[in-house]
Image: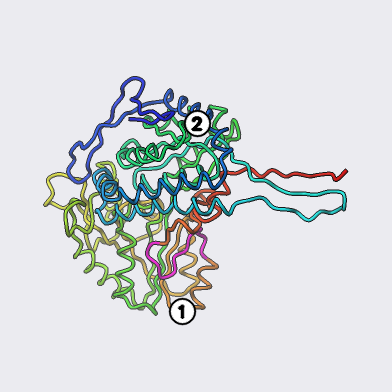
Amino acid sequence: MMYIGGEWVNADDDGKRPVVNPATEEVVAVASYGGGAEARRAVKEAHRAFPEWSKRTPYERSAFLYDISRKIRDRSSELGNLLTQEVGKPLSESLGEVKGSADQFEWYAEEVKRQGGEVIPNKTSDKRYFTLRHPLGVVGAIAPWNFPLLLLSRKIAPALAAGCTVVARPASRTPMAVGRMFDLIDEANLPCGVANLIYGNADEQSTAMMDMPELSKISFTGSSEVGKGLMRKASGSLKKLSLELGGHAPYLIFDDIDPDVAAEKATYSKFRNMGQVCISPSRFYVQESIFDDFVNEAVERVGSFRLGNGLEEGVTHGPLHSSEQLVRTQELVDDILENGGKILAGGRKPSEFDKGFYYEPTIATGLTGDMRIMNEEPFSPIMPVMPFTAEEDAIEKANDTPYGLAAYLLTKRLDTAIRMIEGLEAGIIALNDTSPANSCCPFGGMKQSGMGREGWHEGLDGYYETKYVSVLMD
């Protein structure tokens, strides 16, 4: 069901869509599936609730966010179980996503208390200048299926903290954990209409929201192509946008790192959620002198992974999310082989599973720049590994992409690290780190990987307008 104006409602035409467990291909729920009508009604409810909510003090709004954060933590086991059933990731990863979602509400409950305007030094004795921060209004929050709870929390929490009201639209494939979170929002007694939840046809609902003058902004996480489409839709009314889009993250490994350590870190980063992560590393560049040792260690490590249902004990990696993801992964592997590349591990759907969208973690070498895996955001469990010689070679290869969301770097040499950090064209750089995302740090990309930042104090900036006040001292 959808949550509009403080009430749980079905789609107007009673539309439904099954929710499929990627590990078993069983239908585990049936969700409402609406269209533009529900989106328009949700925006109107959010617009109606905005004046009262925006007048609440930051301390009052903070108390609501703290309460939501506590409720998410208290229900972490239930929420994690739902995430694993609808996304496919192992339970340990789902529980990490739940914690990260609670962290978002807690962080903004704290950060909003530190937000304020500025007093500007006056140029003449008869004037005073200062600024105020004013909440934007109604915000549309759109997130994909791979981290449905976390990515929506990154948008809902700062919007509510700033005094905006929200219409949230998760992917219709993954409605369960988000729906349960809205149960908790309802339990927290958030005023009716402040936070709304809709499911349904993506194009219909985004177009309906964009056409409404009551909507002030869309915050979107997803592909670069969809992001460009939203920019075109937004241009007619100059709606504000925050976009966290595609990535094709390089992973640079220098020869001062032990190949075994490098392989452990690299395979963890690559195969988390089976590569279905926006900041997942997609191109691995390893210094020539340790290239062979690294590849051998990486092959050995992926051979020890245990695939299976993420709710089963001992499973390290789950299935891909859908049959479409499975088909596309095989197409990328076939393209590598057809163009002279080599598959050293994986490269097929495992035969031991009768059901489920499983694919073996795959390591490839012999890559060339014209292969699809080198140009498209893969979102797949494929690890392409290539050698490099000098730092200049590594930087050139790493930056040879229209994307700039994240980049990874393994080295103990400070001078090398500084040159790489300064030269890499990415909004997020992980030095010897495997998972850099955090609620208290800015998250976002350069180039065609989007605009704006989530997290840190910058995550609130996108939900305010700045009012400048000039006072003549008569």
Calculate the distance from the C-alpha at mark 2 to the C-alpha at mark 1.
52 Å
**Quick one: which residue is furthest to the top in this view?**
13
In this picture, residue 344 sits left or right of residue 100: left
- Rendered residue at 52%/45% (across/down): 161
Whichever of callouts 2 and 1 sits on the residue coming sooner in the sequence is 2
Q: What is the quadrant of the C terminus in the image? A: top right
Q: Nearer the viewer, mark 2 or mark 1?
A: 2
Res 402 seen here: no
Q: Which residues are magenta?
A: 424-435
Residue 342 lies within the magenta run:
no
Position above or below: 355 against 110: above
Residue 39 drawn at (x, y percent) = 44, 28
Which residue is more in the foreground, 151 or 301? Answer: 151
Q: Residue 413 shows which numbered tag?
A: 1
- Assign a secondary structure to mark 2: helix
Which residue: 41% across, 29% down? Answer: 4
Q: Position of residue 9 (x, y in %)?
A: 35, 26
Give the vertical position of 404 relative to 469 (above or below): below
Residue type at tag 2: Ala
- Prevalent SS, magenta region: loop
Name above or below for residue 370 compared with residue 132: below
Amino acid at the residue labelled 1: Arg
The quarter of the picture where the N terminus appears is top left
Say left or right for 443 vs 352: right
**Residue 399: horizontal and vertical position, in percent?**
49, 61
Residue 46, disc: 2
